[in-house]
Amino acid sequence: MGRTPGHSRQRMLDSAAELLRERGASGVSIDAVLARSGAPRGSVYHHFPGGRNELIITAVRQAGSYISALIDLAVAGGDPHAALKQFVEFWKQSLADGDYKAGCPVVALAVGTRDDIPEATEVASEIFTCWQDKMCDLLMANGIDPDRAHRLTTLALAAIEGAILLSRTQRSAEPLDEVVAELAPLFRSQSAGTFS
């Protein structure tokens, strides 16, 4: 199947995000993105005048926005437990679809890129904070104290991201299932307003 003309920018962003998920930021080169996307070499600096760093940052921001939209759908139902399960189901499906070779692009950006991509930590923090705020708002809407809601969403995000890494190395969704099993009672209690 041929490449659709005029879509080279999006193909490069998608390819950069895929490479980040598979190889980490150090594994994302202009040549690798061009090889995967099939985009012409001249389009890189046309679409991303800042070069590789701009391409990577833009790809991570796009991936973060996509996942933020999924979280918005999950929290729209108003049930923290259901939102937690939907978020984890997304990652389970994503891992399975990628044969457990691809993790979270935001983590990939955050790990080991301080010197290479100076704004990496700030961008990753911004995205993680957005995700955390969405879940925190849902917990608070269910009557949870703001401090407790913040701690619970920190725990959930850290546990899920860690479980994604374990799932990749074990080639199994079991770590994510175990995280949900342990977090679910907390989220059920929160939504029922009975947390002690």
Image: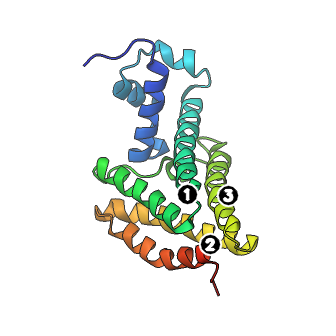
| Left or right side of 92 for 73 | right
Element type at marker 2? helix
Q: Residue at x 44, y 16 (%)?
A: 41
What colour scheme has been applied to the protein in the rendered image?
A: rainbow
* Contact? badges 1 and 3 (CB < 8 Å): no
Tell me which corner region of the image, top left, top right, bottom left or bottom right, holds residue 2: top left
User: Residue at position x 57%, y 79% from top?
Assistant: 189
Separation of marks 2 and 3 at Cα, in angstroms: 11 Å
Instruction: Tell me the crowding category of disc 2: few under 14, some 14 to 19, or many 20 or more residues within 10 angstroms, Cα based.
Output: many
Q: Secondary structure at mark 3?
A: helix
Query: Mark 1 — residue?
Result: 77
**Disc 2 target residue:** 152
Residue under label 3:
133
Work out how far the residue at label 1 is from the one at label 3, CA to CA, in angstroms: 16 Å
User: Between disc 1 and disc 3, whose residue precedes?
Assistant: 1
How many C-alpha atoms fall within 10 Å of the one at disc 3: few (<14), some, or many (≥20)?
A: some
Q: Nearer the viewer, residue 3 or 170?
A: 3
Q: Are marks 2 and 1 in contact (CB under 8 Å)?
A: no
Res 154 label: none
* Three-letter amino acid code at the position of disc 2: Leu
